[in-house]
Amino acid sequence: MHIFDFFQPGVAPSENPTILIQQPIWRFLLGASPQAIARLLDRFSRGPDRYPVTQGFLSMLTLTLWQPYATFIALGIKEFETRSWSTNRREPLLIHAAKRPLGDDEKYLIEHLSRKFPVIGNLLLPIKEYPLGAIICQVNIVDCVPTNSFTPNNLERMVGGWGEGRYAWKFEDVQTMYIPDVSGKQGLWNFPDNQIPKIFGISTLV
């Protein structure tokens, strides 16, 4: 399998609906940096084991987060996701908001952020409007470093766990989207790409 297998010379993906993967990959390539395209081509050139295939469709790497942290990433408020484990992956990643409702601690955090950072407060959603059980944005993983290797700003400290022995995943190139009714998983998981064509037909700020 190679990326160019999904394209017919001189034919735009929208003109060839039989190959469902074309539209997402085509849109990705149009908006991707040369470095991102090079990484994608490298993965395809190394075979299917480098880019998981589910029932004939490509899958996208996905991470499930509790709210409001998933939406903080979608809104650009949170640039780092802190984890107890590191990753060597440097590639696009879908952010999935878990079905778990916001707890008292998360509600307090939203209210505290609104008071401490009035400009950010204008961006935050009302408590009942945070989407649950949905993929809400795509990011690029560009780095992963120990949390004690640098000093985050006050905002990042408030929206992440910066204790000893943790890792900060740095995200860039946020693209908001909304795909509802998706069940999450622990750790990194693959979202089947037979649903991904919906991503590029639904591009709404969440």
Image (spheres, grey):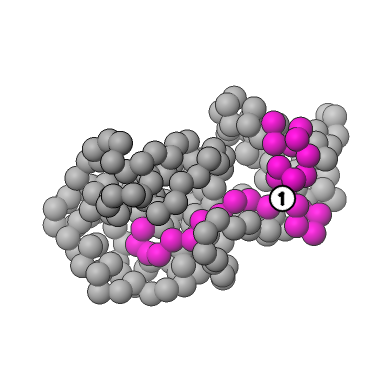
Q: Amino acid at mark 1?
A: Pro
Dot 1 falls on a residue whose secondary structure is loop
Q: Determine if residue 197 is in view.
A: no
Instruction: From the viewer's side, name the closer residue of 108 and 39.
Output: 39
- Taking the view exactly as shown, the residue that stands out farthest to the top is 34
Image x and y of residue 94, in percent: 54, 52
Q: Determine if residue 64 is in view.
A: yes
Instruction: From the viewer's side, name the closer residue of 152 and 106.
Output: 152
Give the residue at mark 1.
52
Q: Which residues are the magenta region?
A: 42-69
Image x and y of residue 190, in percent: 63, 56
Quadrant location of the C terminus in the rendered image: bottom left
Q: Taking 108 as reference, is 73 left or right?
A: right
Instruction: From the viewer's side, name the closer residue of 188 and 175.
Output: 188
- Taking the view exactly as shown, the residue that stands out farthest to the left is 115
Name the residue: 43% across, 61% down. 65
